Image (cartoon, helix red, strand yellow):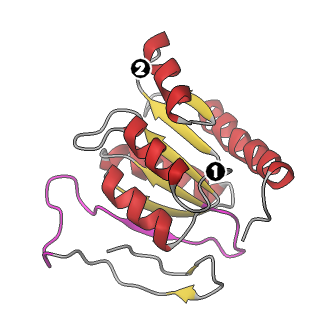
Amino acid sequence: MFNLSGVWNTAGIHLNASNHNSGGSSNTQSGSAERSSAPASPGPLILIVDDSNDDRLLLARMLRRAGFQVAEVDSGEQAVQFFRDTQPHAVLLDYMMPGMDGCTTCELLRSAPGGKYIPIIMLTGMNDTKAILSSYKAGATDFVTKPGAGSPLADYAVLSERIHYLLRGRRRAGPPLK
């Protein structure tokens, strides 16, 4: 289900799975549903959950350049399964997705084993009080407006630094990262 070339799971087992899904066919509407790669020197594993292939691509590229390992899924259901199978160090989660939305996904991730202290950053193109409050109520650690294709590169640098900051806080607050 997940393409995890070069990614290590929480038990320290190297995963080298190929990209496949239960139906044997590819997701033709939004391109590849899952994609992952690791930088030359392994960094923390960040899970990107977004139904937009373009948004996942932009975020993944930025995170890889910042030294993170990246795994991507395109639905809340896939995120919950991935989290249970291979616990990432942090999650970037789209607020508005078809099917299971970001808030429901966030609640399920928080209630999963190991989910209590994982930084979950809610991403959205919306910037209204209702979205922000519902994200925090669902258990999001932080709320960020998505850097868009036309956003300055500084937006990506800020997001990358925000992730590093939350991971440092996570190391101090919770059990050791794996």
The answer to which image quadrant residue 125 occupies is top left
Q: Residues within 10 Å of mark 2 (few under 14, many from 20)?
A: some
Query: Where residue 22 is drawn, which disc sits there?
Result: none
| Numbered circles on residues, count | 2
Which residue is tagged 1?
Answer: 116
Q: Is residue 89 above or below residue 59?
A: below
Is 24 magenta? The answer is: yes
Furthest residue to the top? Answer: 129
Report x, y in % for residue 88: 58, 63
Quadrant of the drawing holding the N terminus: bottom left
Q: Under tag 1, what secondary structure?
A: loop
Tell me if I can see residue 152 in this picture.
no
Q: Is residue 158 left or right of residue 17?
A: right
Relative to 39, 25 lies left or right: left
Estimate the spatial distance between the alpha carbons at disc 2 and disc 1, rounded to whole Å. Answer: 26 Å
- Above or below, 33 against 76 in this view is below
Residue shown at 50%/28% (left/top)? 135
Q: Amino acid at mark 1?
A: Lys
Give the vertical position of 20 relative to 165 (above or below): below
Residue at point 41% right, 52% down?
57
Most foreground residue, 117 or 88: 117
Q: Residues within 10 Å of mark 1 (few under 14, many from 20)?
A: some
Main SS category, magenta section: loop
Residue 115 lies in what quarter of the image?
bottom right
What residue is at 49 percent from the left and 11 percent from the top? 129
Going by the image, does 45 lie left or right of 71?
right
Task: In the rendered structure, find residue 126 and report the number of the disc placed on it.
Answer: 2
> Which residue range is magenta in the image?
23-45
Please state which of residues 72 and 176 is positioned toward the viewer in this rendering.
176
Q: Amino acid at mark 2?
A: Met
